[in-house]
Amino acid sequence: MAMAASFHRALNGGEAAHTELVLLVLFMVLALASSSASAIDGSGSNLTAGFVQVELPEGNFVVQSPYDVPENQRYSYDNVTGVRTFLVYAGDKPFNTVTGTKPRTEVRLSGHDYSSGVWQFEGYGYVPTGTSGASVMQIHNEDAGAKATTLMLHVYNGTLQYYSGEVVEDGIYDRWFRLNVVHDVGASTVAVYVDGAPRLAVDVTPSASHYFKFGVYMQHHDVSPLMESRWRNITVYTKPY
């Protein structure tokens, strides 16, 4: 209502009113640019162009957390802000009594396992100072081989890394960053973008099927006593060949 009144004054007033109109139009243009910036990379290209967004109802966000404590002690979802907070302690149990894996609090995106095409994960992540030795995002596969993942992004002492090797992004602590991960199944390639900038391009081992996960999953070295990550605006896109 206030904006409509401002337009009315601008259209019917003098020089000051017309100045107000110019400012209002500028504000709307900036707001529109900001709202559409999430998919734009550093070169001005739209990372999601040609992709179709898939539906992600809340039931697709399946939480895996230590089996011996209530889920709400390790995971929370704020309906107002849309922020999902993940915590895990180095001494926590696995997510069930059968697996011998390290402790984790993660979301497994269910309902969208894939075996062909090109798939893209997009989300805004936040890792607080102190978290180390944790995977915060991964592409899991269903093969029973020695390597159960197609991609893992680890945090070690403020650096986001491809597994425990190549640096993806320095200075990851205490800031919201936009993460885009594009998996071309047929080509067996994965590309990673941080805040729209290309940061990693790797060949990966083929697998029968894949799915996305994010949160905190303890790894094997430089592990902090407490690991935490926060995520919001999780979106998945796909396109066929």
Image: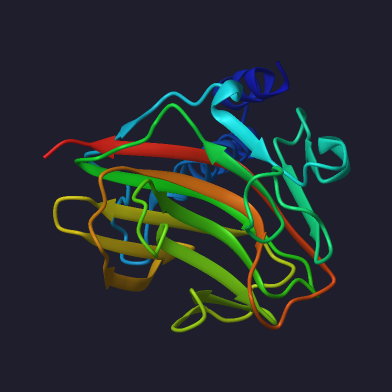
111 relative to 120, above or below: above
Q: Is residue 125 above or below residue 11?
A: below
**Rendering quarter of residue 176:** bottom right
Q: Residue at x 70, y 45 (%)?
A: 95
State how the image is colored.
rainbow
Residue at image position (62%, 56%) is 125
Position of the C terminus by quadrant: top left
Locate residue 107: give its quadrant. top right
Say left or right for 149 vs 201.
right
Q: Residue furthest front?
A: 98
Say whether residue 136 is left or right of residue 120. right
Q: In the picture shown, does residue 154 fall above or below 206?
A: below
Query: What is the quadrant of the N terminus in the image?
Result: top right
- Residue at horizontal 88 percent and vertical 42 percent from the top: 73
User: Relative to residue 75, is residue 214 drawn left or right?
Assistant: left
Name the spot of residue 108 as percent of width and height, x first. 55, 40
Q: How many marks?
A: 0
Q: Residue at x 79, y 73 (%)?
A: 129
Q: Is residue 83 or residue 93 the one in the foreground?
A: 93
In x, y percent, where is residue 216? 67, 57
Which residue occupies the foreground of this view, 212 or 167? 212
Left or right? Give the position of 227 relative to 49. Answer: right
Residue at the far left: name it.
241
Residue 224 image point, x, y percent: 79, 75
| Vertical relation: 240 (above or below) 103 | above
Viewer-closest of 76 and 83: 76
